[in-house]
Image (tube, rainbow, N blue to C red):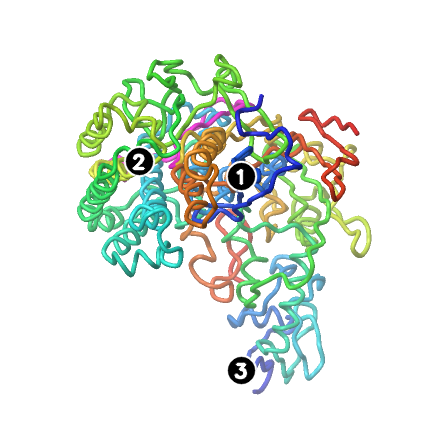
Amino acid sequence: MSGNAISIDGVAVAFEPGQTIMQAAEAAGVYIPHLCHHPEFAPHGSCKLCTVKVNGRNGASCTVGAQPGMVVENNTAELNDGRRALTQMLFVEGNHFCPFCERSGNCQLQAVAYFLNMTSPHFEHFYPPREVDASHPEVLLDRNRCILCELCVRASREVDGKNVFGIAGRGIQARLVVNSHSGRLGDTGLAATDKAVQVCPVGAIIRKGTAFRVPVGKRLYDQAPISEVGTHVTGQGHGKT
Amino acid sequence: MTFPLETAANPEKLKRVAIEPLSRVEGHGKVTLLLDDDNRVHQARLHIVEFRGFEKFIQGRPYWEVPVLVQRLCGICPVSHHLAASKAMDLLVGAKHLTPTAEKLRRLMHLGQILQSHALHFFHLASPDLLFGFDSEVAKRNVVGVAAAFPDVAKRGVLLRKYGQEVIRITAGKRIHGTGAIPGGVNKNLNPEEREYLRRDLAQMIAWSRDAVNLIKRVYTERPEFHNGFGHFRSSFMSLARDDGALDLYHGGLRARDEHGQIIFDHVDYGHYWDYIHEEVKTWSYMKFPFIRSRGKEQGWYRVGPLARMNNCDFIPTPLADAERREFLAFGGGAARQANLAYHWARMIEMLHAAEGIAGLLDDDDLMGTDLVTRGEKALRGVGVIEAPRGTLIHHYRINEDDQVVRANLIVSTTHNNQAMNEAVRQVAMQYLDGRNLTEGLLNHIEVAIRAYDPCLSCATHALGKMPLEVELVDGAGRQIDCLAKDGDSSCAA
């Protein structure tokens, strides 16, 4: 290993100056599980799913800059156990009913859970009361499925220039809110083609009238695990990362 | 209203016998009998003890989720719920007429469902009684016993069911709980490879279905008086029928005949089913009691399912099944038309029809078309009705302007048969149990009567908030100390 390179699980990975570990890994085709990271947006570091060991210490790979000679552990039993626990917490903190969710098969949360061999929620379900906002004619906001990744918040602010979404409250009270006088999506300037609609990694923000159009067997994660096909969903989401 | 043997006058003086849980039926139920010291039956009830509540918890959900969500009512007949809900959703999105590809693909899916469900019931659940006898050795009276004594019969049952499940997998994406039907159409067609795959074993399936009809016909006709008379009563029947009177399991108008075979109503647009059918609730069951409105609660109850469809249709549009139907109706001068156990015979004729119908559809190139979805003017109310394996299945939804479900009413096949199953229980209790020392074999007679209807108890209990309940506190001598009652309108009184 020489020059601008790091080691991920013993394999040398080159990087460009200024890249994070996640960006270097993506460029090299190395999968690090993640949910709040998106290559088109600045590092966020909130879901912690991409935690790796950097020279023996934990760090979020989407926020830690790559430095020459770094030794990174990624696909280890210890790290994946922790990631699985985080994923299980996301499931029980919301109301995720994969059997009838239209994002099933195209959902990053579900795909990450499969990748991490999550076979049960393990923790007791919170069953929190969460509101569904169906007031927009073309977009449904189902907060039951929100994992607070803030991708819609960032996309609306930075790409769409509309500032439609925000996170209110702290800790377990944190929730996705809508920036309008009524607090309802139908009273915002959101358009179905906005980046904020396309970027949701789960089934929290979905376009009306498109549900279940892709048959079982043809959905993104019916084809291969998320580690192989990335996170691109036709008309929704972003490219292989 | 109360029927004879439904409620005993002095229950505190009677001993209670419970058959719990009912075996070889889908879902959880029990039968209770109240007997006096001479083992005379004073009360016999079929209780549905599980509770589902789908009608309530889909409120607020977007309508397009409904066909995928409500099929989770059942693991045996999910396709029926999937399609009944989809038919209702078609109306919500203004799809009054589906494309030929969409309708035929749904019909294929549905016939696969009929085939697998009927095979499951006959071979796995009912055949132990029919092949070994109602009071045969209990340790062998199950599908494992059938596999040991009649390996060919058991094997055919498994493979017939497997074939039906394959039809479902190819049309819906999964054997259980797929997503094939969407509001206004379907999400896939049939490709040539899939068509050839389904054609490969079809001749065998038709042949085995014919054998199954012959098997039940032989069993039934060997002891005609016993089978005709087992828990016998007369009732009305209701089903869908095509405009020309043909058996149609996917679509048609509502048709009802009375106990003498006379038409009560016909060609009824099911979009206004509530003008013809009402539901009664009773304190002792989570399942509602529907009745034909014009005949009232006492006379208006009816039966649905294979026997109802045999009686109601004018013909079956596949030749082998229609020949069997005519033979069935002619048997004994029509003696089997009202018999509980004739449900098995009718069910196998329908399985043959399903196999024939699949063959006919697979010859239709429309299945491989690419025009899958149609849309029109949005509506806020949709009713979908289908003939599920167990009978007429009604799904009724209202949504708001934001596309969320605000009201749902499901009248499930087994619910239509609620009164009939209770009547069968009472008749069998009087015929075989009254005044005798009870044995397992005698009690199984009660279960045999219920099993004839192939009830799906999981499907049938949804009346959250509507169910009247009575809670009684009694002392050791059976004296009532306190009582709290909640009426059907949710009012509460001490």
The image shows residue B102 at horizontal and vertical percentages of: 35, 34
| Identity, as a three-letter code, of the amino acid under mark 1 | Asp
**Picture quarter containing residue B138?**
bottom left
Dots 2 and 1: beta carbons under 8 Å?
A: no
Work out whether residue A175 or residue B390 is closer to the camera in this orientation and state it.
B390
Identify the residue under disc 3: A11
The image shows residue B478 at horizontal and vertical percentages of: 72, 39
The image shows residue B266 at horizontal and vertical percentages of: 37, 15
Q: Which mark is residue B227?
A: 2
Which secondary structure lies at badge 1? Answer: loop
Q: Quadrant of the C terminus of chain B?
A: top right
Is A193 left or right of B442, judged from the image as shown? right
Q: Earlier in the sequence, mark 2 or mark 1?
A: 1
Which secondary structure lies at badge 2? Answer: helix
Determine the CA span between mark 2 and mark 3: 75 Å
Q: Are marks 2 and 3 on the same chain?
A: no
Q: Which residues are magenta?
A: B364-389
Closer mark to the observer between disc 2 and disc 1: 1
Which secondary structure lies at badge 3? Answer: strand
On what subunit does the disc labeled 2 rest?
A: B
A132 w.r.t. B197: above or below = above
Q: Are marks 2 and 1 on the same chain?
A: yes
